[in-house]
Image (cartoon, grey):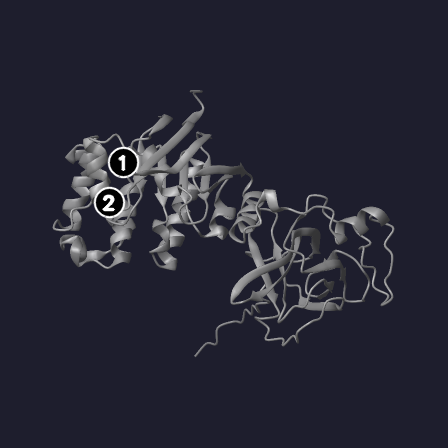
Amino acid sequence: MDKGTAISIENLCKMYKLYDRPSDRLKESLGLTGKKYGREHYALSDVSFEIKKGETVGIIGTNGAGKSTILKIITGVLSPTSGRVVTDGRISALLELGAGFNYEYSGLENIYLNGTMMGFSDSEIEARMDDILSFADIGDFVHQPVKTYSSGMFVRLAFAVAINIDPEILIVDEALSVGDVFFQAKCYRKFEEFRKQGKTILFVSHDLGSISKYCDRVILLDHGTKLAEGPPREIVDLYKRVIVHQGPEDQKKGTAVRERAAHNGADGAQKGSDGIPWTTPFEMNPGALEYGDRRAEMTGFCLFDKDGLPTNVIEKGTELTIKVRVHYNEDIDDPIFAYTIKDTRGTEITGTNSMYERVAVEPRKAGQADVVTYVQEVNLQGGEYLISFGLTGYRGGEFVVYHRLYDACSLTVVSTKNTVGFYDMNARVTVEPEQQP
């Protein structure tokens, strides 16, 4: 393994034998008849990847994708059926609520227990005790049996132990979803501190915003196989396709928006009968991600500034108008129209849809077309953003994606005054001399 690599996974497999009845397991183990009663289930199948030292890497996937299994193998909780795992550095892991804790022991006793299991002496644990107790912030409950703790208190203590024993590799599995917002903020500040120190973080989360914000790279697992790995924005978008069964093999290329844009060119926008330049007078993202079953589809879009001019450069504090043309290829009941603004890392910053806004949409017939208009006051900080569009609905009670167009085009916000964060909340600041008595 390369000296700059913290974790190396090669052709990793984990297979379980599943039996319909407990007696079948016994019959097969005795081997009296030679008959196979169980069926093989691969929680992981031929998974390979490397994580460099100092990287923050996320693992995402649907339930049953193999995320927790691979973390347990890396930390030695499980043994692989085949393949190779090599790590370089002290590992601290927070895999499951309660893992490694004795419920009858007090919080303080569990700190010593966990520290000892990680190879620390009592004096080394005591040297870190103040940091652990300060981070956990559970007060006198540290002297009570952990079986009396709430789930939030439990994870605070477990995370405080895991993160304050000076690991070189930190592995976390969904634990942060239990803590409150203040604890989560404290954990992510610690993540940033770890990254600056060149330490490695590997974590599983369903919080795609955190994945996009904190990860250098993301690995997508699906039914035990590695589907893809790459930049957060790209992999998170792919994951959203997988959720609605529109994986890479289902992608349909050459859709109406792209075909028309490519035919007319970025600067050759043609206006429709309604006078709207549907092929956009600015550049469309050539790497825009499109998918859906196409029972209805978006065949064009355009952005307008406060003066009604088509452009993707908007002045902060002014109105942005977005128009999207929708064509129905089949009868559709209650379509839902959506748009989202993301930053360049893929973090969803704002957006809305017709359902949130309580816009009633009558059933549409095949062959009909609509123009959907969104009007948004832009108080975003100056910078570069990406706009995505969605056309979804429900059929027979099931959520359906008719057409999604992710990162369709860029949005440039021009500002003469930026504040803190993504948004300008238009605060007012006054300074007045104190009145003397």
Q: Residue at x 18, y 32 (%)?
A: 30
Secondary element at image label 2: loop
How packed is label 2: few (under 14 Cα within 10 Å), some, or many (20 or more)? few
| Residue at mark 2 | 99
Residue 77, numbered label: 1
**Residue 198 in view:** no
Residue type (three-letter) at the residue carrying disc 1: Val
Which residue does the image show at 17% across and 45% down from the upper left? 110
> Foreground: 172 or 425?
172
Compare residues 187 and 58 and report the one nearer the observer.
Answer: 58
Q: Position of residue 207 (x, y in %)?
A: 45, 52
Residue at position x 17%, y 50% in the image = 107
Measured as percent of width and height from the top left, residue 175 is found at: 34, 50
Which residue is the extreme one toward the bottom?
Answer: 437
**Quadrant into which the N terminus falls:** top left
Residue 100's image quarter?
top left
